[in-house]
Amino acid sequence: MKKYFTITRDALKKKIDQESDFVLIDVLGKISYAKRHLPGAISIDAHEEDFIRQVERRVPDKDKEIIVYCASFSCQLSPTAASKLVDEGYTNVVDFEGGLQDWEDSGYAFEAK
């Protein structure tokens, strides 16, 4: 039984470009987020004890699509965050496994704070 879905960078880019209805969460933390993040992403640090509470505050609808990402394919923060969200009852959780590195490798643009 798979707990959450995954998405490729090109599929995510298409969703962003089409302004699809989803929440994109950078789980790396505020410093990383300020340096660069994916377009439209919000920052909720997966290291924080109240990670789930922060998500619930920002995304009260447990059926809303949530896409999480971290630094790279080897980074385990986004899969961990995705699992936590599923465990809390979120039904449409997606992990962009490639994260910032995969996005950069594609040449896609970042936003910065």
Image: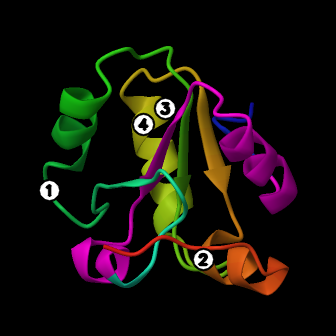
**CB contact under 8 Å: marks 2 and 1:** no
Q: Nearer the viewer, mark 2 or mark 1?
A: 2
Q: Residue visible at 24% across and 29% down?
A: 56
Q: What distance separates the C-alpha of mark 4 from that of mark 1?
A: 13 Å
Is the residue marked by circle 1 packed among few (<14), some (14-19), or many (20+) residues within 10 Å? Answer: few
Whole-percent x and y of residue 63?
50, 14
Q: Is residue 19 magenta?
A: yes
**Which residue is identified by label 1?**
49
Nearest to N terminus: mark 3 or mark 2:
3
Q: Which residue is mark 2?
A: 100
Q: Amino acid at mark 2?
A: Leu
| Dot 2 alpha-carbon crowd within 10 angstroms: few under 14, some 14 to 19, many 20 or more | many
Which residue has dot 3 on it? 86
Which stretch appears magenta? 8-34
To which quarter of the image does residue 72 belong? Answer: bottom right
Mark earlier in primary sequence (2, 4):
4
Q: Position of residue 60 (x, y in %)?
A: 29, 19
